[in-house]
Amino acid sequence: GEKLVLSELLQPIHPKSALGSVRKELARVKKKAPVELPLSKEEAKRVVREAAYDTTSKDVGKWQQVVLQNRRAEQLVFPLRQDITTVVPLERATSAWRARTPLEQEIFGLLHKTQQPITDPLLTPEEKASLQAMSLEEAQQRRAELQKARAIQSYYEAKARREKRIKSKKYHRVLKKSRRRQALKEFEQLQKSDPAAALARLEELEQLRMQERMSLKHQNKGKWAQSRAIIAKYDLEARKALQEQLAKNKELMQKVRVEPPEEELRDVPEEDTAAVAVPTAASGANPWMLGKPSASTPESEAQEGPGDVPVPDAAESKEKMEEEEEEEELSDEEALLQDFEQKRQARQERAGSPEGLSKGHGADEMEGTAEQPGDSPVPAVCAEEPVSAGLEPPPQALLSEQLRRVQTMEDVEALASEEHVEEQEKPTASRVEKQAQRQEEGKAGDRHAREAPAKKKIISLEAVLDGKPQELDCPSLPIVMEEEEGGIDQRGVITEAFAGDDVVDDFRREKRKAEEASKPQPVNLVLPGWGEWGGTGLRPSAKKVKRFLLKPPPAPPRKDQHLPHVIMSEKRNIHAAAHQVSELPFPFERHQQFEQSLRTPVGTTWNTPRAFQKLTAPRVITRAGHIIQPISAEDI
Amino acid sequence: VPRNYDPALHPFEVPREYTRALNATKLERVFAKPFLSSLDGHRDGVNCMAKHPKSLSTVLSGACDGEVKIWNLTNRQCVRTIQAHEGFVRGMCARFCGTSFFTVGDDKTVKQWKMESPEYGEEEEPIHTILGKTVYTGIDHHWKEAVFATCGQQVDIWDEQRTSPMCSLTWGFDSISSVKFNPIETYLLGSCASDRNIVLYDMRKSTPLKKVILNMRTNTLCWNPMEAFIFTAANEDYNLYTFDMRFLESPVMVHMDHVSAVLDVDYSPTGKEFVSASFDKSVRIFPVDKGRSREVYHTKRMQHVITVKWTSDNKYILCGSDEMNIRLWKANASEKLGVLAPREKAAMNYNQKLKEKFQFHPQIRRIAQHRHLPKSIYCQIKEQRIMREARRRKELNRRKHSKPGSVPFVPEKKKHIVAVVK
């Protein structure tokens, strides 16, 4: 029952060759290369194994980090996953259990008769809510915050009380003065930023001044002033104070032409600007300048003193040195005030507020140097060097950055020593350089000779500090070599090179020193004042000294007594050696490391309980009765 | 109590601490009494043991007469006895959930048993019994799935529900003595055969991975439960070898101290140490990263130790030996058992720290390292030392009298590896 389609009937009849397809296939087969033999069974298995091993070891390798971390861990707590134990209701725990023995059945029969609630929830809703109300961490955080706030408040209160209780008039005076200055400074700032507000403020200040003037406070009518007046005849200080007050009075009574803040402001930076005038003029090679950073340290130390009382000697001598045309001495308050101001400014600097921009950049620099009291003489040097090198004025940020980078005391010291060396090196190096240039100018075709005129003008810092060109230019050694090249043999050179050190003599001296050191020292047990008069400047009598100065028996003869070329140390204690480690144990690389590991004590005698706990924390902690499961991906 | 910690007031800190360390070390040796108890009840040598995965107080043991006993460690009593097989119980393992356990025996059967004792009126019968064609010499259960592996002529991996293995893995023709699943990467298996090789398998691809051939036969191996690629093999040549499975060319560490074949090894659950049982009638504890043991346990009556286990709380060690006893030891010989007061704990930690700090000092080291050994072991150690020295001297002489470079230096780690087969 196939169906015929009309279109098929309409097509012409093709003579179809039956072999066509076969021929095509034959051609295809001919084109193909012969198939390779399949791998032997063993080989095939081996390939599979290798591939599997690669992937598996890669899989396992992902634990590498975890393993290393655990091996290096200071402390491991097992089990790794700390499960929070939950109380499972008895009913759930024993769901699978059924009473089987007659005894059990009897007991359960009795129990079930009473109809006790079996599936009660363990916690009532109220209990649950109360548990969820506040988490432990939240509560702890809140408590910590409150504690901190309370502590801060109490600090402030204590501070205020303390300050209020200070009786020193000088302190209050100084405080007042400094406050006034601060106000002025602020005003100055305000003037720049907001002239209108500044004007209003000025009005206020004027008001205040007028009030003070009207109060007749400085008229020398007060009790204090009168008492001073009596003493003034004999006491220099009192006279000075009185004069000061008079000056103040005069100032107040004066009709004001110029704006008073400007006038008063002048005496603040006056000293500074005066002081600065010299350094800016001075060149880098000025020895007076070079001495400065080191000289600034004693002053700063003095200022840092704990009593906060200015040490007039140090400060004044320093100031005298710095500012010669200044009046011969500043009063104590002034010094104190300066100190305060410096500290405050230093603090502001650290906070990063742009202060004191009104002054010239020279003044800024000086401020910079003075601002770090005792902290570091380094920034001062840094500030000066560019000036001496004739570069553009340094921005303030450079200074502060320097401060921040150098944090520890050691850094500072290291840096300081470095700078010092450089500073000393500079003039000599430059001199040497010039010499070399002059000498080499004679020789033709030298690169340096051509550059010399340019260098004479500006000796840049980089060129001076750079090591290599210096060595090239250094005339002393090569010139000497040239002169003596032919004449002296090797031995002569060596003797000349080591002309200074006499090895034999050194050794003899060393040996003598060792002998001296090994001699037993007499023990002095003389107590002054016992059995005779005591007091300063009295010396114990010769009789007593003779009696109480214990002379030890002479030491046994040294082993190297008759060996002139040997020093034998007799320090080694054989009895102690039995307890000592003779060779460096494995994990340590240097004996210092090992000694350090022993030196720090661990016990409570030397450590606080907290530190003790930390120091003695065990490597591995396991909890009794807890099963430690193998590590798994969830544990990490 | 406020204290002044000024170091000037408390001088001589190093000598004082040294004295304390010395005392601590001495006390440690004084209190080192590791033996706790012996569980007796078997009527033949104990051949295998298994830990309960969920209960610390339960341990299972199989003896050479086909008897399986379940012990309660807190009471130190046998809870249950099953006559499981005829002939040896070759291997046993507990299911990961702790509801049942498997045993294989010389009667060519694998049996699954319930962990709970039969209820009132029930017969003591296995849940399943699989009768195999050949003897099974070992069994281990997968750590997470219902799959277990047996070994004998080949390594078979079984589904618990079926009576025929899911797949059989072979490589070579010798009988395989032990097979162990990796506890972390659970598809990995390691086996050791009597033709001196250790073979690793991957269960997912059901193919062996690599084979390493050692000088002598490996008896058992154990995977580190904290480090996925580390396993330790207990060898007949008195040594243990810790391998990294990614680098089988040489072991990470060779642990030597035993003076006879090592028969069994088990890792502590923290993965920091392992315990080994030896034919020389002693049990030794090795740190993983040390070549020498830190502790040796022996008693007068303990014979060849065949099997050893470290309990899952890292506190005790169990060893089963030829003379039918299972012995319970402390893992840390001088540890005080029971609850410690906080001060006691602090003192203990401090002493530990001191011992660690001054461990290199000769007097302290001498005390800390001192162990008593039975004469037999002591003499054997001496003998072996002489032998080793002789061998070393011979090699030295040989090197001296032959062309430079012709006698190569072979490191100890490489000496024991014959070949690695891909």
Image (cartoon, helix red, strand yellow):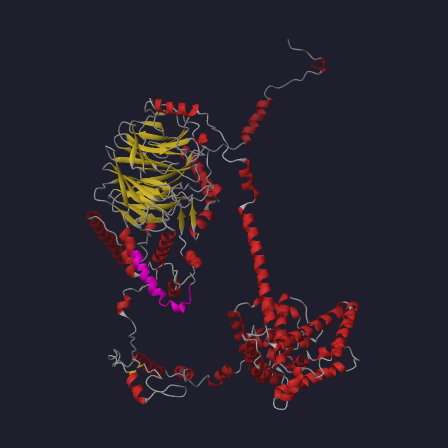
Q: Residue at x 53, y 82 (%)?
A: A475
Q: How many marks?
A: 0
Q: Position of residue A184 (x, y in %)?
A: 71, 73
Q: Position of residue B57 (x, y in %)?
A: 35, 37
Q: Is residue A54 above or below residue A576?
A: above
Q: Quadrant of the N terminus of chain A?
A: top right
Magenta stretch: dominant secondary structure: helix
A356 with respect to A621 (left or right): right
Q: Is residue A592 above or below residue A370?
A: above
Q: Residue at x 46, y 85 (%)?
A: A484
In this view, the residue in front, B350 or B213, is B350
On the question of residue A354 being in view, the answer is yes
Q: Position of residue B254 (x, y in %)?
A: 33, 49
Q: Is residue B350 above or below residue A344?
A: above
Which residue is the extreme one toward the bottom? A233
B258 with respect to A410 (left or right): left
Q: Residue at x 44, y 25 (%)?
A: A114
Q: Is residue A386 above or below residue B288?
A: below
In this view, the residue in front, B376 or A469, is B376
In this view, the residue in front, A559 or B98, is B98
Which corner quadrant of the image does residue A165 belong to?
Answer: bottom right
On the question of residue B162 being in view, the answer is no
The magenta segment is B3-25
Which residue is the extreme one toward the front? A223
Which residue is the extreme one toward the top? A1
B314 with respect to A186 (left or right): left
In this view, the residue in front, A29 or B69, is B69
Which corner quadrant of the image does residue A259 belong to?
Answer: bottom right
Q: Position of residue A580 (x, y in %)?
A: 30, 65
Q: Is residue B56 magenta?
A: no
